[in-house]
Amino acid sequence: MTDQRELAAALRAAVRGEVDLGVTARALTTMDASNYRRIPLGVVAPRDADDVAAALAVCRERGVPVVPRGGGTSIAGQATGTGIVLDFTRHMNRLLSLDPEAGTAVVQPGLVLDRLQEAAAPHGLRFGPDPSTHGRCTLGGMIGNNSCGSHSVAWGTTADNVRTLSVITARGERLRPGPGWAGAPAGLRALVEGESARLRTGFPDLPRRISGYAVDALLPENRADVARSLCGSEGTLAVLTEAELTLVRAPRARALAVLAYADESGAAQAAAGLLPYRPLTVEGMAADLVPSAAGLPRGGAWLFVEAGGDTGAEARAAAEAIVRAADVVDALVVTDPARQRTLWRIREDASGTATRMPDGSEAWPGWEDCAVPPARLGDYLRDFRALLAEHGLRGTPYGHFGDGCIHVRIDFDLLTGPGVARFRRFSEELADLVVAHGGSLSGEHGDGQARAELLPRMYGAETVALFERVKGVWDPDGLLNPGMLVRPAPLDADLRFSALPREPVDVAFGYPADAGDFSAAVRRCVGVAKCRTTSVSGSAVMCPSFRATGEEEHSTRGRARLLHEMLAGELVTDGWRSTEVRDALDLCLSCKGCRSDCPVGVDMATYKAEFLHHHYAGRRRPAAHYTMGWLPVWLSWAARTRTAGVANALASVRPLARAAKRMGGIAGEREIPSLATEPFSRWWRRRRRSAEDDGPLVVLWPDTFTEHLSPSVGRAAVRVLEAAGMRVVLPPTLRPRSGGRVGDARSRSPLSLLTARRGRVCCGLTYISTGQLDRARAVLRRTLDLLEPVLATDAPLVVLEPSCAAALRTDAPELVHDDPRAAQLASRVLTFAEALERYAPDWTPPAVNRPVTGQTHCHQHAVLGDGPDRRLREAAGLTGELAGGCCGLAGNFGFERGHEDVSRACAEEQLLPSVREAPQDAVVQADGFSCRTQLEQLGGVRGRHLAEILAEALEEE
C-alpha cells in the first residue's frame, strides 16, 4: 500500500510543477472518454522534461505506476490508471518551433492540435491528421494513439507525419527515437532481428491498422523507424516530452461534395471507388445519426467527400468530377467555407450524438473504430448489422469509409451482470468477425482496455508474446500504463458504471430525457470534451468558465466527473454535502451553453441547481442566495412601498453601498443597479390604451428585470407589438379562491376583487439559479394558478427577458413535472421576435439601416434559438452578426463575491471586443438585463433590447 502523504512529499520535493493528490484532482482523472474508470493516486503537471524524469524516478523507487495523459479523450481506457497521472496540458503545451521552409514543427506533448493548425495556417501548412476532437486533443495523445481523422485518405495517420521523438523511459533513460534505429533502447534491435520473419508475415496490410505495437516499422525495408514504432503505443513504452512533426501543404481552396445514397450499405460500397480521384476525405454517416437532415441532399446515408485545388474553380471542378463518378441518389457541392463548417459539424458531433439512440436510450463505446480493407467495408457492415441483431443490440455506424474504419456506439447494458456478460460475448464474436474480414480491432483509437484482451484473436498468441517482450525491453519494471495493450486487464473489468447507485436518486427536477434518473443524466457526459475548447466560433457558448480559467474542474466534463464520483461515493464520500463538487460548480455561470453545444446535451445549469438544493438543505446559505436569489421579493417590496428612489439614493452613498454589498455577498467591484421609480406595470395601468380590440391577443410577461430595472424595454415592446397590430395585455394579478376565471387576462370583476387573492407571475429563475428549488416550485405553482385564465385561451405569453423565457420553457416543466399546466405554459412562451413572426407575419418593421453589434444571449442560443431574431434584424436593416459566448454577468453570478475576475474574463472574450471593434454608428443590441449591465459597468456602453431599437425607429418614422 502506497503512503500517499509520503509520495506527495517526495514528488513535491522533486518536481517544480504542480503535484496534487487531493480528492478533486483524482476525481477529475478517474475516466477518459471510454467505458472505464480507475482511481489514480494523484496528478503531476510537469513543467519540462526534467520534471518528467524526476517524477518517474520517485514513482520508480516506490513501484507506483505512471499514466501519461493529454486531453483525456481516449475511447479505449488508456488515459486512466491507478498510479500517478502526468498532465501535460498545463505547462508542456507549447509550440517550440515551426519551420515553414522545411515544413516541420517541434511541439510539446500537451499542445492542442488546433493551436498547431492556427500557427501553421498563415504559411499554407497544416498537420495532416485531424480527429473530430481537434479543438481539445493533444499532439502527445495523438502520437500515443496514432490518431488519424477525416483526412487520413490524403495525409495518413499520425505515425506517417512524425519525424523524431524525445522520450524518457521508466528507468530515466533519455532517448531520441527516429529512423535507422535512432534512439532504440538496448536489446530492441536484437529482438526484432530475431523475429523478422514473423514481422513480415504477421501484420495485416491496412491503412488503419492501429492495434498492437507497430514493431514491423523496425524492419529495414521500413527504415527501422523507432519513432514510428512508438506511435500507437499508448504510453506503455516511454513518456513523450517532445516531437518533431511533418506538416503538409494545405490546398488553397476546398469544395465539399455531399453524396447521398439510399442506405448505409450503398455508401460503404461506393467509398473505395472514389479513392482514385484523390479526395481529401471520404467520410460516411447514415440518417439515424443526423438529428435533422436539413441542408443535406435527400437520401438515407451520405458520404462527405472533400476535394482541394489551387483555386475555388479548380476545387469545385474536382468535387463535381467526384459527383459524376459516383452513383448517387442526390448530391450537393458546397464551396462556401461557412456552410462547409456547418455540414462538417454534423459529422464531428457524431462522436457525441451517437451516444444516444433515436429513442433516447444510451449507447456506449467499446467497439468504436474497427477497420477493414475499404473494398470489403460494405460486406463487413452487413455482417456487423447481422451480429448486432443476433445479440439484440443496436448501433449507428459512421466514420472514415474511405479507410474502411467504422465508428459505432452500441446500446450495451453495462449496468447489470447479464448485460455485461452479453457485452463480453458480443466483443469476442465481433473480434472474430473483424479478423475474418482481414481487419484490425482498432483503426484509430487504440486498444487500451477495450480491445487489448482480444489481440490474440487478431495476431495470434506468439505475436502477442512478442509485444510483451517489446514492452519488457522498453519498460522492464512494467510501470508505464499497466493493464493497457499488453498483459491487459479484462475488457469487462473497471467499468465506470459499476460504482453508480442502482436505484434512482431522489431529486427535484424531473429529468424527462433521462427517465427521471439523475445518475443517467450525469452519465450523459462521455468525455469527448467539446467543453474544453479554448475558443468558440459563431454563436456557440460552452464552456465560458473553462475558457476563463483553463482548469478541468471548471469545464462541463470536469463538473460531470465530480458529480459521477459524488454518486459513486468512493472518492467523494460526503454526497450532496461535498465541498469538492460545490467548489467546482461555484464558477458555473448557469449559461446553459452545454444544453445545446454539448453533443450529448449535458445540462450543467440544471445539475448545479439540483446540487445546491440538496447541499444547502436545512443549512444556512451564502448571503447572495438571500439577496439576489430573493430579488423578486425585495424589488416588489420597494415598488409597493414606493421606496425605489430612497434605495437609489442610499446606494449612491459609497460607505453605505460598501456595507450593503459586504452583507449581501455582492462583489465590491460591482455597482448596484438603479431601481426604476415607476415599475413597468404601474406605467401600464396609467397609460391610455387604444380601444381597438380586433388584433390577436398576446400576454406580455412582466418579468422582474423589465418590471423593476428596465421598464423601458416593456414600454418599447408594447409600442412595437401594438404597431404590428396586436392587442397587448398583462397577466392576471388575482387568483380566484373558487376556481373561477378572471376575464381574459386584462379585466377584473368587482366580485373577483372580493373573492380572489393578489399575486404576481414569476418564472422562478433567481430561485432556480441559486438552488432554492422548493421556493421556485412554490412560485411556479402560484404562477400557474394565476395564469389559468390565460391558459384557457389560445393567447401566447411574450417574454422579453431571454433567461426568463428559457426558464419558463424548460425549467418550469422539468421542476413542476407533476403539473400538466407547466408543460402547457411552456408551449405558450414566445420571444419578442417569435411573436412578431407568428402573429404579424405581414408587418414590415421600421427601417433602422445600421450595423448591429452585441451578443446573442446565452439562454437564447441554448434554449430558445435566434432564427426569428436574425430574420427580424434583417428585415429592419440591421446588418452584421452578434457575437457568441457569454457576457459573464449571468444573472447573480457576476455580482457574487469572488466571481469578478471570471466574469470580466468572459466579457473580454467576445462581448466587449465585438463592441469596441464595431463601426461607430453601430447599434449595440443586448436583449438580456445581465448583458446590458455588463456592457454598462465594464464597457461604458449602453446596450438596448431589440424592442427598444425598433420602438425608437418607429418614433423616428
Image: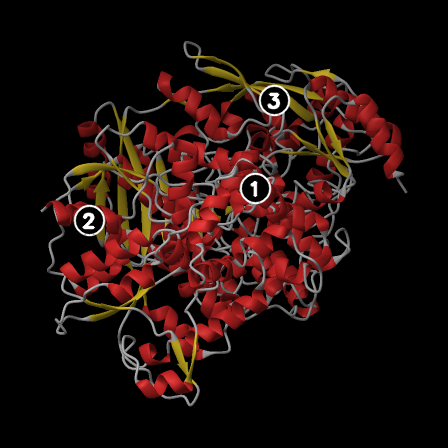
What residue is shown at x 62% (from left), y 57% (from top)?
A: 612
Q: Who is closer to the viewer here, 18 or 294? A: 18
- Disc 2 and disc 1: Cα gap in Å? 39 Å
The disc at residue 950 is 2
Check if mark 1's residue and mark 3's residue have beta carbons within 8 Å: no
Q: Is residue 298 above or below residue 116?
A: below
Mark 1 residue type: Leu
Q: Is residue 709 left or right of residue 456?
A: left
Residue at mark 1 to residue at mark 3: CA–CA distance: 67 Å
Report if the CB atoms under discs 3 and 2 are less than 8 Å apart.
no
Q: Which residue is mark 1?
A: 656
Front of the two marks 3 and 2: 2
Q: Secondary structure at mark 1?
A: helix
As shown in the figure, which amino acid type bears the numbered disc 2?
A: Leu
Residue 180 coordinates in the image, percent (x, y): 61, 14
Q: Residues within 10 Å of mark 3 (few under 14, many from 20)?
A: many
